[in-house]
Every structure is written in C-alpha cells, then in structure tokens.
Amino acid sequence: MAQTAPAPDGLSSVPFSPLEDDIRQDLRSTSIQAFREVRGETERRAAPLSAEDQAVQSMPDASPIKWHRAHTTWFFEQFVLAPHVRAAAVGALTEAAVVSGLFLPFLIAGEFRMFDYRWQVNGDTVLGLFVAPGTPFTWSMRLAQGIAALGVGALLAWPLRRTLHAVWLAPLGVVAMRLLLDPVRYPWYWLALQVLALLGMAEFLTSGRVERVTRGVTNYSSWGSRGSAIR
C-alpha cells in the first residue's frame, strides 16, 4: 500500500510508494552529507588565508574566496536542503545575513569594486549569435539575465515542488538559461550543467520507473514466447 507523505500547509497529501519514500530520505541524507563534505573542503582550503587574503580577486575570471564561500552555502540551502517554503524562507534570510556580513565591510570602507567590472559579448557564445560581438554587457543586462534564469527556475520548480525532479530540474533550468544569456564562455561554466544532468539521470535510474519498464518488457517477452510455443 502506498504511503502518504506529509504535505506543506494548505496542500493536500501526496501518495508516495515505499520505494519513492525511501529514495527521498536517502537523497536528503546524501545531500546533507555532500554539503558537509564540500563545505569542509572549502573551509580547509580557506583556513590558511587571512580575511584580507579572501577579499582579493586574484584574476578577472575568478571571484574572491569569500564570494565562493557564500555561494557554496547558498546553493545547498536554496536548492537541496530546504524542503518547504518556510524552511526556504528561513534559509534565504540566513543567507542574506551571511552575504551582508561578508560584503558590508567593503561597502562601508568604500573598497567594494564589483560594480566596476565590465564585460563584452564574445563571439563564441550563444548570445553572440544574436548580439554583435564586442557589444558591452552592462550590469543592467546582468540583472535581466539573473531575472530570466530565476524565472525559468521558478516555472520549473512550482509544478514539480512535490517531486524529486525539482531537486535537479529547477537548478538545471537556472544554469541553462544563465549560460544561454552569458556574454562570455569558460569551460568550467559547463560543470554545473553536467553535474545537475548526472543528478537527474541518477534520480531517474533509482526512481523505480526503469524497474517497471524492465518488468513490462520482460513480461511482454515471456507472453510472446508462450504464444509462439502454443502456435
């Protein structure tokens, strides 16, 4: 008999099979462990560096270390660990406080120069097919890019909010839209897309659908063999 998963406030309960319920629990446990491992490795690499070292942007193509430390927490909290709207809101407020703590000193000191950075549309990007290469890509365009990416993620996350697909498909949509509208192209930009695609494949292979399809093919083959034997 199918089990019924507890539903968020105002939503009806959703039936899950025992296999799907176990997979949900395993995925959450694995995600928490992955967060701890990634966060631990991040902290280990940042440990020898002072606060001033972590504020330096070593090259135009790399963000300061403090930026990466904030992004790591934000990704896991918003897309993996937060199971309900209330928990997601708490995570968002916490992350806002963390980001404010990281960057507020630079704003107060007058040394926050992130908005001085400028981009140009490269000819080897998808955006370069529609916008002339060399066209300045302004911060207002960056804002529009972010809104478009979050919009795609929201459109995918809302109808899939009661399924495991939301864990990987919504972030995949965000990353894909961001890459489509990005003025520059670096090889490591595709790593997030590949990781999320692998997560989706893993979810599909462990969801029970493959087992049902295989069982159906086996039953069909057995029925066909029996029919041939009778004839």
Image: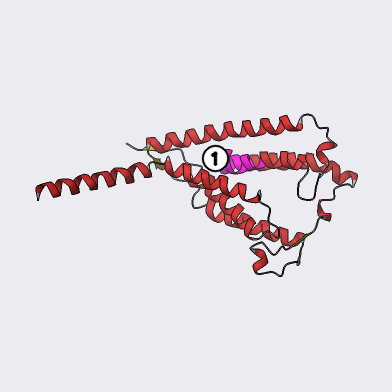
Taking 63 as reference, is 23 above or below it? above
Please say whether residue 189 is one of the residues in the magenta stretch: no
The answer to whether residue 113 is left or right of residue 14 is right
Q: Position of residue 214 (x, y in %)?
A: 32, 44
For image coordinates 47% across by 37% down, the residue present is: 24
Name the image quarter holding residue 97: top right
Pick the front one: 182 or 3:
182
- Residue placed most toward the observer, 170 or 7: 170
Residue 230, position as x, y percentages in the image? 10, 48
Q: Dominant secondary structure of the magenta stretch?
A: helix
Percent across and percent down for residue 123 are 69, 65
* Residue 10 seen in render: no
- Residue found at x 18% / y 46%: 225
Residue picked out by circle 1: 83
106 left or right, relative to 186 = right
Whether residue 107 is visible, yes or no, is yes
Check if residue 84 falls in the magenta segment.
Answer: yes
